[in-house]
Image (spheres, rainbow, N blue to C red):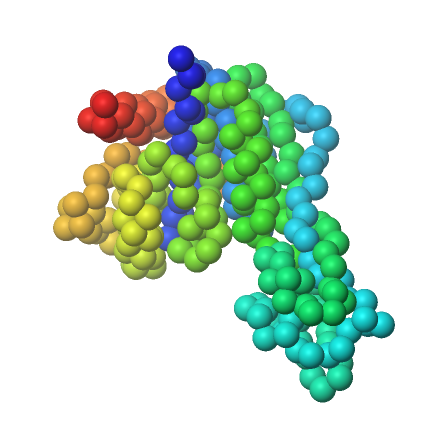
Amino acid sequence: MKPRPAAVIAVASGKGGTGKTTVAAHLALASSALHATLLVDLDVEAPDSMGYFPGAVPVGTAVPVTVAVPRLDESSCTACGHCASVCRFGAVVAIGSVVTVDAKACKGCGRCVSACPSGALSETEMETGKTSLHRRGRLEILEGRMAIGDIRSVSVIEAAKREEGRLPVVVRIRDCPPGVSCPATHAIDGADFVILVAEPTAFSLHDLDAAVRLVRGRGVPSGVVVNKAGFGDADIEGFCSDRGIPVIGRVEFNASRAASGAAGALWEDDPAFMAEMGRVLSVTLDGRAEREGETR
């Protein structure tokens, strides 16, 4: 009998600054008390999950993430323009008799190389970022990090997702990029459940609406954790009730938590908060078990 696949819980938000990483890190901490757990930082443009675990020990060495980009042999190029006509990203430009390749804009699809009739284009690997693994007790932390100046976050996200699938854990917690663009879409794909973190402000409520539509469009079950509850006056719970999305957790605002979060300190000695993270974890894992039972 094959082992049961790890539960994959994605923690996302419609905007940055809602407490998404705080929830993801502590959810992983709560899970690691019960299960072998992996925290995956897929917010690769600005990964900061490791800031909560400064004592985590590196496991192995960082693994480069690369994409295959075109290299032009000018002596073989006839400037026919076929390569530029098939490039969907503006990475290959043909003007008159001059063809130029912007390797940093290339997404590595290989269409230009296949379209070149003279064989003037070949592929070479270009580094877009790295993944690295750390360990703290039963918790492993996998970080994806883009190379400085690069724009291909999706390549690093997908590389980290492939790496997470090779690690023998019971629960995987993904800290996803904020927003609803391509990086967020790739980060939540393959998840069993998406936790959307929102705060009671007008900005967060507006962006939560977009995030709910994204998650529902991907067909992934979801619930909302209200962070900084009592700090603002936007009716997050009323919105969730109207949309038929459950509120699965509340984190009350207080000054000491805010100060600890700003310092990147774990709240593991805050019993009320850790109990709430345990309840959120139970909701997501129990819901997965129920869905699996329905499909048998």
Q: Residue at x 28, y 39 (%)?
A: 221
Residue 36 can be seen, yes or no: yes
Does 235 sit left or right of 51 as displayed?
left
Q: Position of residue 153 (x, y in %)?
A: 57, 52
Q: Position of residue 98 (x, y in %)?
A: 75, 81
Total count of labels: 0
Q: Residue at x 59, y 69 (%)?
A: 87
Q: Residue 57 versus residue 106: which sits nearer the camera?
A: 106
Does 227 sit left or right of 104 as displayed?
left
Q: Residue at x 73, y 51 (%)?
A: 125
Kindly indicate the quadrant of the structure image that contains residue 55. Answer: top right
Q: Residue at x 70, y 41 (%)?
A: 64
Q: Position of residue 279 (x, y in %)?
A: 29, 25
Q: Position of residue 250 (x, y in %)?
A: 28, 36
Q: Residue furthest top?
A: 1
Indicate the quadrant containing the N terminus: top left, top right, bottom left or bottom right.
top left
Residue 257 can be seen, yes or no: no
Q: Residue furthest front?
A: 117
Kindly indicate the quadrant of the structure image that contains residue 106. Answer: bottom right
Q: Residue 62 versus residue 268: which sits nearer the camera?
A: 62
Q: Residue furthest left?
A: 242
Q: Is residue 244 above or below residue 57?
A: below
Q: Is residue 54 above or below residue 221?
A: above
Indicate the quadrant containing the C terminus: top left, top right, bottom left or bottom right.
top left
Q: Residue 18 versus residue 270: which sits nearer the camera?
A: 18
Does 189 sit left or right of 44 as displayed?
left
Q: Residue 180 versus residue 158: which sits nearer the camera?
A: 158
Q: Residue furthest right?
A: 75
